[in-house]
Amino acid sequence: MATPLTERLKADGTAVSIGEYEASGGYRGLEKARAMSGHEVLDLVKASGLRGRGGAGFPTGMKWSFVPAKDDGGPRYFVVNADEKEPGTMKDRILLEGDPHQIVEGIAIASRAIGAEHAFIYIRGEYLASAAALERAIAEATERGLVGRPEEGRGPEIEIHLSSGRYLCGEETGLLNALEGKRPNPRNKPPFPQVSGLWGRPTVVNNVETVANLPHILREGPEWFKALSPGSDAGTKLYGVSGWVAKPGVWEMPMGATVREILEGKAGGMAEGRVLRGFLPGGASTDFLGPDKLDLRMDFDSVGKAGSRLGTGTMVVLDDKTCPVGMVLSLERFFSRESCGWCTPCREGLPWIVRILEALEEGRGEEGDLERLEDLSRKLAPGRTFCALAPGAVEPLQSALKLFREDFEAHLRRKGCPWK
Ligand SMILES: Cc1cc2nc3c(=O)[nH]c(=O)nc-3n(C[C@H](O)[C@H](O)[C@H](O)COP(=O)(O)O)c2cc1C
Ligand code: SF4
């Protein structure tokens, strides 16, 4: 089973050096990209079928193609989104810490495709080890003349920016505001960042895992990339599992591996004495799926058809000894705290949801609370708020209300949490 993104990672956790990276074929993708025009690089990535790994699964080549083709002589920017604050998600950190040259090479390839001479890595503030590994890798690559000399066609210049730490800084337009030194409120779209992004200039934002795929696609070609997966979504995917399982962790597998292959095969199944009740397939802001979905393929389309989202591909598991109402409350507390307060349904709706869930847990629940929660979920549906934080926040709630209805009702009936 090919694992191009993680096969160089070292057991002792230290970062792959430039020598080790080059010895395993590193920077050959960039060499190829530099022998091609930016447009040819873009076409090749488009042909590979790569879809963004930051959560929405938007086709990467198509995203790049929205950058205006005509060069007006002004700057363009490429930005790596390494904020990774989605609860339950810890996949990008492994790539950043363990194989930073893969990211540096991916940045140089993407910058070649869109004509960017400056790139930024916007990284979660707590990821100090990742930032240090990247800094070293950028210095090594600059010293070898691989990046950092845009005036000689060996760009881009790469800067690392440590986030000051809000979930919303990961939303790509909030991220751009944060990079500009402003409050990370999301921006109106359109215009999309590809047309008017950082300081009003064309900008592409891509997730770490998306970027990590680029060196391999350039080196091995689009057909090789498509053949890595058994289904229609190309490539491999970093899947993760957290919760009461035997071996929580992150593993690279073919895109479209089944829930069973990940949960039982890699995570070793449920921890002793625990039974699977459900799981959030792609981080905290996705809908719960039940144990009947063990044979579901974890790719964008299959998870979408099953009523949830692949999101970040990192599952959060719910077992039979954990209260689903308490679990959802903990997630909604996070989302409510992280709301930027810009639009009323999110600013007022999320704290209201938290208050109702707290009341249910503490035995103060009232008749009509479950209907109120359903109504609030509808009011925070996609299109009702300025950004995707609020619709994502209600995905675990609305699905829990359906899948674990009897648990919510038991809180009302028994005047408190049956698990306490
Ligand atoms: C509240 C919120 C937080 C987000 N956090 C992240 C994040 O930490 N990392 C990330 O790559 N994308 C995050 N996203 C998605 C980004 O807005 C964007 O879609 C992504 O960086 C695009 O990269 P891709 O095309 O490579 O997937 C977030 C979105 C929202 C609404
Ligand atoms: S949905 Fe929430 S986080 Fe997004 S802009 Fe509105 S208030 Fe801010």
Image (tube, grey):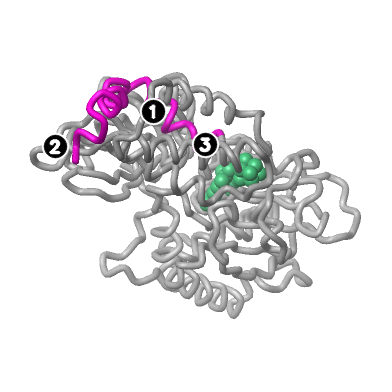
Question: Spatial distance from mark 1 to mark 3, Cα to Cα?
Answer: 29 Å
The residue lying furthest to the right in this view is 72
- Left or right of 115? Residue 86 is left
Q: Taking the image as drawn, is residue 219 in sight? A: no
- Left or right of 342? Residue 217 is left
Q: At which x and y percent is residue 205?
A: 65, 51
Q: At which x and y percent is residue 297?
A: 36, 26
**Camera-nearest residue between 313 and 276:** 276
Circle number at residue 392: 3
Quadrant of image for the N terminus? top left
Q: Taking the image as drawn, is residue 120 in sight? A: yes
Mark 1 vs mark 3: give the one in front.
3
Residue tagged by mark 1?
Answer: 230
Circle number at residue 219: none
Mark 2 vs mark 1: give the one in front.
2
Question: Spatial distance from mark 3 to mark 2, Cα to Cα?
Answer: 28 Å
In the image, is residue 35 above or below residue 18?
A: above
Q: At which x and y percent is residue 210?
A: 53, 47
In the image, is residue 369 above or below residue 31?
A: above
- Left or right of 164? Residue 420 is left
Question: Spatial distance from mark 2 to mark 1, Cα to Cα?
Answer: 31 Å
Residue tagged by mark 2?
Answer: 274
The amino acid pointed to by label 1 is: Pro
- Give me the residue at 45% from left, 40% from top: 354
| Sequence-earlier tag: 2 or 1 | 1
Is the CB of mark 3 within 8 Å of ligand 1? yes
